[in-house]
Image (cartoon, rainbow, N blue to C red):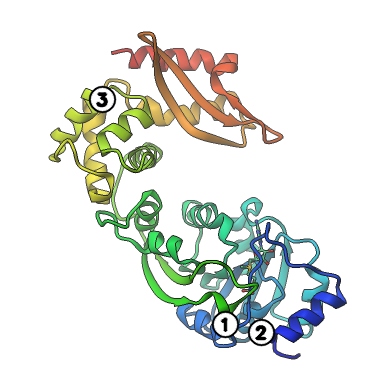
Amino acid sequence: MPELTDLSVIRALCEKYDFALSKGFGQNFIINPGLPPKIVDASGVDRRYGVIEIGPGIGVLTRELAKRAAKVVSIEVDERLPPLLAETMAGVDNFKLVLQDVLKVDLKALIAEEFPGMPVAVCANLPYYITSPIVMKLLGDRLPIESLTVMVQKEAADRLAAAPGTRASSAISCAVSYYATSKMMFTAAPGSFYPAPKVTSAVVRMEIRPQPAVQVEDEEGYFALVRAAFGQRRKTAANAIASGLGMPKDAVTAAIEAAGFDARIRPEALTLEDFAKIQQALARRIPGHDHIPRADAHIHQVVPDAQGIVNGGRIRRFGGKAVFKAEYIAPGGKRQFAGQHAGIAQLAAGVATAMAV
Ligand code: SAM
């Protein structure tokens, strides 16, 4: 097989299969021959490993992975790619293609079926447009994997690798750090890809922790708090939490102070432990606070086929009245407000009463 990093080989393949690279699928293929071995080196994968790759494209990283790992399962969404991959991966018998959107794959089941008894790692040059949802799925699903090594846009890499409590940190830095330790490995210039993206890229390696970095009683509520704190970039943590979770500002400020912080503290100055302390202080200060995260569970009780929750549950105040609002994704992908659902409205009324302080 000729070198897949060779631009004339890529062009010939595209022509043969009438394939045009799709911007919409984030298709920027590696053309720097030094990169695939460097990415696999960074992943620490060897012959013992089962590897999940997301987005094989025409298989340039896939082939390097298959050379060095026990088995590679690559998940690709673009239905035009299998014929090209059949040619570029011909004769590679430890490779399997799963043609599906990675966000819809049951990865736990896939790992159990494809990699019994093997250590498992994820290694990929990710489609940049869905970096955060993919990383959050890989971490949040608590998969039996050892590590994730991903090529992403440099700015995203900075956030994935930033330690909470430092300037570059954000909600995703906190989520990564909760589940994993992360390390910036190296950067790659736009010219390493075809077509060249407008941005520099970088590889980050995340090693899954055996236990989350902090112990919290209510994980969903914890992440709702972290997301709210970072929800409005230039606001103080107190303002952002109050408006993001729909809580009284003075109660949030008091809770932040009770947890030992200045009321004007910014979210990026807070560590994972700090957020845990604030969560506890909030629960003590605001009756019914612990109902908020559970709104997510309520929705699943009442609408068992809800596909996902948007924004979690929120209590909003309109004209002195506390009103419950939670948006969920109904089957078929339509967004609906929980208040529009009678069953949820009843549950919501209970939550709202508890919150009406
Ligand atoms: N691995 C190849 C390389 O390094 O040259 C291609 C990487 S390219 C940046 C991203 C790949 O992810 C493309 O093949 C694209 O079609 C695929 N992709 C995009 N969205 C996806 C999704 N939701 N699920 C699975 N694959 C996806």
Looking at the image, residue 105 sits to the left or right of residue 212; the answer is: right
**Which residue in the rendered view is the most extreme toward the bottom?**
2
Disc 2 residue lies near ligand 1 with CB under 8 A: no
Inter-mark Cα distance, 2 to 1: 9 Å
The answer to the question of whether label 2 and label 1 lie on touching residues, with beta carbons closer than 8 A, is: yes
Looking at the image, residue 303 sits to the left or right of residue 153; the answer is: right
Q: Nearer the viewer, residue 277 or 256?
A: 256
- Whether residue 25 appears in this view of the structure is yes
Inter-mark Cα distance, 3 to 2: 55 Å
Query: Where is residue 335 drawn, in percent x and y?
Result: 62, 30
Q: Quadrant of the N terminus?
A: bottom right
Q: Which mark is residue 36?
A: 1
Q: Which mark is residue 249?
A: 3
Query: Where is residue 178 drawn, in percent x and y?
Result: 35, 54
At mark 3, the secondary structure is helix
- Whether residue 47 appears in this view of the structure is no
Disc 1 residue lies near ligand 1 with CB under 8 A: yes
Location of mark 2 (residue): 5
Query: Where is residue 150 drawn, in percent x and y?
Result: 51, 69
